């Protein structure tokens, strides 16, 4: 069955079943379940979560899902595995965004698999036309209920060797709490976008 029609069926069902209980509530709950992860972050990576205490793994699901049907799951890494770079099938402005790379890298690191973090250059090998000048495409709306943590707005070419660095990212995260947006100049896009400004 097409995902779209399944969605419609579920919506219809939730209205029928939830009629008395409140269909609006059922719809809201369903919306939340569209972004998933079973990856668990080590407690030493609390800094990598956003202000809503969402791990980089679940925020990455929001970011990657934003170019599709707002349905995305970031699966946990099994030993030795890494997240796949965008390929011809799934490359888009979201999966090729700075935010997606930074968040999936932080998600890799927080599972104590920092050795599996790819370089930005390897990551965007098949992104060509989807690369942008900002951390997330300005014309795409991120679903509500999340926010992109400040360190994930970093241009990946500024990481050492163009490779996400958890130590530097942690320092940026700490900085953003102490002196918001002063020590790291924001491209104008960060200010123009209302919904997904990195914290
Ligand atoms: C692209 O990546 C996805 C997810 O990693 C994978 O399932 C798919 O087979 C890949 N497609 C190609 C053409 O390599």
Image (cartoon, helix red, strand yellow):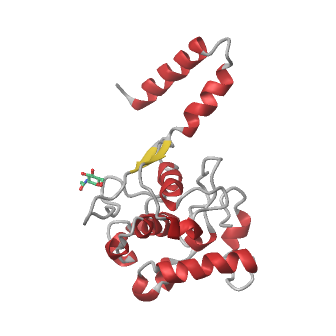
Question: Which residue is rendered at x = 56% and y = 61% of the image?
Answer: 137
Q: Where is residue 87 shown, x and y percent of the image?
A: 31, 60
Please state the horizontal and vertical placement of residue 79, each as a whole percent of the image: 26, 63
Q: Is residue 72 above or below residue 137?
A: above
User: Within the image, what quadrant is residue 169 found in?
Assistant: bottom right
> What residue appears at the point 44 percent right and 88 percent down from the top-left corner?
160
Q: Position of residue 190 (x, y in %)?
A: 68, 69
Instruction: Report whether residue 124 is seen.
Output: no
Left or right, 76 with respect to 44, comes to left
Residue 132, x across and y down, in percent: 52, 69
Q: Quadrant of the N terminus?
A: top left
Judge left or right: residue 5 versus residue 188: left
The quarter holding residue 126 reads bottom left
**How many marks do you count on the picture?**
0
* The C terminus - image quarter: bottom right
Left or right position of 33 against 85? right
Q: Farthest residue in the front direction?
A: 43
**Seen in the image, is 71 located left or right of residue 14?**
left
Image height of 127 relative to 3, above or below:
below
Say above or below: 140 vs 104. Answer: above
Q: Is residue 5 visible?
A: yes
For image coordinates 69% across by 76% down, the residue present is 176
- As drawn, 80 above or below 54: below
């Amino acid at each position: 069955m097409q995902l779209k029609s399944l969605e419609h069926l579920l919506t219809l069902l939730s209205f029928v079943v939830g009629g008395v209980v409140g269909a609006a509530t059922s719809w809201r709950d369903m919306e939340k379940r569209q972004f998933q992860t079973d990856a668990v972050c080590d407690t030493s990576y609390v800094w990598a979560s956003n202000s809503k205490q969402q791990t980089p793994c679940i925020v990455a699901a929001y970011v990657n899902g934003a170019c599709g049907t707002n349905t995305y799951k970031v699966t946990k890494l099994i030993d030795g595995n890494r997240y796949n770079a965008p390929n011809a099938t799934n490359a888009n402005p979201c999966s090729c965004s700075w935010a997606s790379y930074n968040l999936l890298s932080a998600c890799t690191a927080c599972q104590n698999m920092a050795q599996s973090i790819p370089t930005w250059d390897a990551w965007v090998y098949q992104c060509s036309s989807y690369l942008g000048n900002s951390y997330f495409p300005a014309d795409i709306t991120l679903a509500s209920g999340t926010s992109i943590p400040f360190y994930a707005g970093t241009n990946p070419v500024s990481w050492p060797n163009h490779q996400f660095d958890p130590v530097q990212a942690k320092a940026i995260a700490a900085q953003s709490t102490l002196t918001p947006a002063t020590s790291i100049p924001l491209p104008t896009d960060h200010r123009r976008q209302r919904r997904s400004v990195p914290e």
